[in-house]
Image: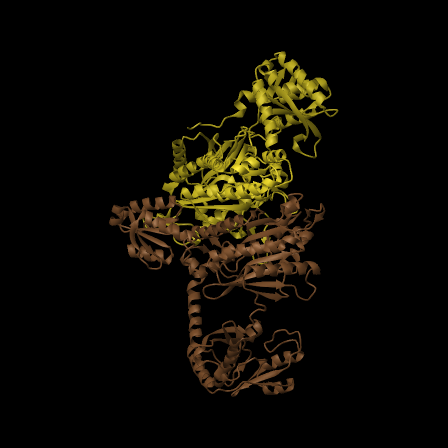
Chain colours: A brown, B yellow
Amino acid sequence: MADKGQVNYEASDLYRIRHSAAHVMAQAVLEMFPEAKYTIGPPIEDGFYYDFDLPRSLTPDDLEHIEKRMRQIIAGNHPFVRKAVSAEEARRIFKDQPYKLELIEGLEKGNQDEYGNPLAEKPEVSIYTHDTFVDLCRGPHVESTRQINPAAVKLMNVAGAYWRGDEHNPMLQRVYGTAWRTAEELEEHLWRLEEAKKRDHRKLGKEMGLFYFSEDVGPGLPLFTPKGEMLRHLMEDYVRQVQTRYGYQHVWTGHLVKEELYRRSGHYDNYKEVMFPPMVDENVAFRLKPMNCPSHMTLYREMGRHSYRELPLRFAEFATLYRYEKTGELTGLTRVRALTQDDCHIFCTEEQVGSEFGLALRLIQEVLARYRFTDYRVRLSLRGEGGKYVQDEEKWAKAEAALRAALDESQLEYFEATGEAAFYGPKADFLARDVLGREWQLSTIQVDFIQPSRLGLSYIGEDGGEHIPVVLHRAVTGSTERFLGVAIEHFAGAFPVWLAPVQAVLVPIADRHVGYAREVAEKLAQEGLRVEVDERNERMNAKIRDAQTQKVPYMLVVGDKEMEQGGVALRLRSGENPGAMPMAEFLGRARKEIAAGE
Amino acid sequence: MADKGQVNYEASDLYRIRHSAAHVMAQAVLEMFPEAKYTIGPPIEDGFYYDFDLPRSLTPDDLEHIEKRMRQIIAGNHPFVRKAVSAEEARRIFKDQPYKLELIEGLEKGNQDEYGNPLAEKPEVSIYTHDTFVDLCRGPHVESTRQINPAAVKLMNVAGAYWRGDEHNPMLQRVYGTAWRTAEELEEHLWRLEEAKKRDHRKLGKEMGLFYFSEDVGPGLPLFTPKGEMLRHLMEDYVRQVQTRYGYQHVWTGHLVKEELYRRSGHYDNYKEVMFPPMVDENVAFRLKPMNCPSHMTLYREMGRHSYRELPLRFAEFATLYRYEKTGELTGLTRVRALTQDDCHIFCTEEQVGSEFGLALRLIQEVLARYRFTDYRVRLSLRGEGGKYVQDEEKWAKAEAALRAALDESQLEYFEATGEAAFYGPKADFLARDVLGREWQLSTIQVDFIQPSRLGLSYIGEDGGEHIPVVLHRAVTGSTERFLGVAIEHFAGAFPVWLAPVQAVLVPIADRHVGYAREVAEKLAQEGLRVEVDERNERMNAKIRDAQTQKVPYMLVVGDKEMEQGGVALRLRSGENPGAMPMAEFLGRARKEIAAGE
């Protein structure tokens, strides 16, 4: 179903509520510190902030006081009034506010908005007033302070921030707040924050012993323990199986190539900044691969003449790529320097673009469902104005129409983003919400009209003539590392049974049950289950608690009774306690749940 | 079974026969070109050569003539007579032979043997004479020319060779010959040469479309096609399964680390030459991993405190390593710059070294048998004299005894090589013969006393104190690339069914059978077989011939009769023709052969 146009936060009521709450907060702060200098206070995702230059640091008590005063101001039902002013007039109003004067100067020059961001057109200077407070502001705001729900506003914390983000400027105090329509929405938001902290994949990754970063190896270069590697392996193995079923073939092209190839493909100019430094000897420079396209295309060419009968050819590879992200921007597994893409390049004719795109859509839907991502939408990025796009009106029109038709047929929710296409062709990105409602860009399908010709690819058509194939770039989960980071948070570490690195832990009650526990473990392993025996000298309850921390799906307690009857006593990580059962019954249950993707 | 002492080629009858044949050849050449200058002529693997400075290039006719004359000399039954001479006397004898005079000078100085190789001790100068020919020579030779079997000698070819291998010296003509005990042995050798040419993995790799090298990517950096990647995948997947069954765990540590880590581990000094150039920015230098040990040990350490209860810990990884081999030394897949080791590091106590070594021996035996390598022996490399070995008498003695005991128990054929150990501990290498009798060093197990302490590893012992673990380095197939190269030649491309990238090709007789062929292919794929349909517009015989070139195990011909009966007509790559059978019968046969490793 086409949902034309991206949801526009700036046009939403929440944006107006938060923007207005920021003004109300600034009023309260100024009342408390009349000598305060105030700077900017925009709405942000899930809330707002305001930056102040204050005579002293704010305390938690101050925040409480400010919040209380905000509720009083809100109760006053003061209207927000906009007024266009000349720069001269604005300078008079803010004569004691040096930061505002700097902003006015920018507005007057016509190259910056009131937040100091660059602007294309010279804006009108305007102010917004409510009660005693006046701010340099383009809006929009609610009509009156009573449209801010006082039960749905909360100040969160204070942090340091340099004026205009520049460390050479004075350090300001940034007060963060959040505002919602209802107290319930606020509650839910606070729960999500709390839950996100608990689910943070860096925290869970450590608790569950999945991966580590080492100063000795380097930033952004994760090391995966046996459990972490098992997750990687299961994820890649699963996608490989699906890809094979969809007629994809896998190739292998290593981790580095001559720099010269990237100069020819055009990547050098566009990606130089994110490439690792070159490996240079006297004769040649090599680069770690930041992407696979030139390698897959080179393989296609080296394989010799291709006939239209071979197309579409779908080359998939789980290749670790290296990108030299700034160390300050690295975040656990979701922003790394080593990323293993489940990459694919589909070589096809122009006529096959639509059906190949549709096939990729179905494949992605199947995989996302397996990971219980069911709430997602597709952004269809189309060509806009401007010279960056490859000039071939007919190709663009045909490809865009083919993609739109395939999306319409797919019944997927999608919206169009004009001017967001890559320079080489239109693309579709999957934006999936996790259980906390956060949106992640995961899968992508991109049409490419340009690289195949730059790298000299061809096929012999039905007409006997030489043609240039179109290439579709496609990634399903994106990268193993990032997807794993997202999945850890999505599942809060409690992976579905099929994906759990350890599926069952045998918990012998006393030392005399260890032999039997090993026997059971051995049998289950032979049946293909991933099983451990907890042989530590600990009490049963401690072992169960630890297995729950590790989010192991099945805990199998074995004592005298179980030994006698040749069974196990099953407990689940949820706390449920199905109790004693014969081995076969447990095995049947486990198999059923694995097959069902539970 | 211990076979103490390596088989010594120099002490063998074949060595004496070949050395003597080289003298006989030189006599024949000198008779043909009295002005010839002769240089050196040693026995080599499978034969001998002699280097001459001649007035003109030798032709194939010349070789025939020389070979004929050699048989006459042999028939003369001339004794080989040794005589010790002074350098003075030698100079008189070879007064017209400048190369010999140069050699005599080396012998006199006492630092070179008669082939110009460096020597530890000053040698006695000696000459060998038979018939009219005299050579500067230390022997050994047969007693008389009749001990060379004239029916088992053959001249092979002529090639250029610089005097002493130095391109600044004159270019000589090197005549290669081969000599055996019997005509049958010679025949077999010639067959092996012919067969080796046919089986050359570079040739077969191209014919079967398995891998390519591209100038655009770089020398020694193979690109694997879908079929080649499938081989890699099946090989690694198989070893992974075996390793898992043997209690190994898999980890993932990426492809690069900070150079500093290699300085600490000691690899920088020993491996600098084979590392790719560094990737350097202002703050740090990274290196592509030439080996995994420091990464696995760093992971062990980052995982936190280890207890003796966790040991042995076996970390395995299929990691692509990069070694900057000289381009002139690269050979197809058997000498590459990108090698994916099936590497493992076993962290254990000193007491566990013997049992872990034994476990690794059994694992290797199982894997080699799967690839039908049954003829192999183990070289047990022990410490020798000299300062390079880590100084810890007790550790060496214990480890060497443990390895010997495990080998004795394993019933493997092994020999001891004193002074061949690594500086950090004793090791065992598997030398396996392929079907052509060529010996390849594949698997290795190495004991390491030193890196664990350099990189700060420890575990808490049963005594509550801190101890340093011993590490065993172990590789089964060595590297995926090299082992695949060897396996292609070993199987002549006709991989066992379980390993064949394509297991069955459907051959529809006419266009009207294509639909049915696809249906059958679909069903077989669902049963887990790797199947293709040959839909080309070719005659059936051409399709069968091509499938045979591709060494596909099963060709399934389908025509009217098969469609009617719902069956297939089976042909084998061997040329056998089992004929028409129901689908179920074929499937049963395939499954049985796959399970049997056929």
Q: Quadrant of the C terminus of chain A?
A: bottom left
Q: Is residue A201 left or right of residue B73?
A: left
Along the line of sight, which residue is nearer the eye, B474 or B120? B474
* Residue B247 point in image, percent of width and height: 40, 44
Residue at the image position 61 percent from the left and 79 percent from the top: A103
* Residue A473 point in image, percent of width and height: 60, 55
Where is residue B504, by image quadrant? top right
Q: Is residue B519 left or right of residue B158?
A: left
* Residue A30 point in image, percent of width and height: 50, 84
**Above or below, B442 relative to B7:** below
Along the line of sight, which residue is nearer the eye, A260 or B45? A260
Residue A48 seen in the current view: yes
Residue A481 seen in the current view: no
Along the line of sight, which residue is nearer the eye, B519 or A488? B519
Where is residue B229, by image quadrant? top right
How many marks are shown on the rendered structure?
Answer: 0
In the displayed orientation, state which residue is furthest to the front. B564
Q: Quadrant of the N terminus of chain A?
A: bottom right
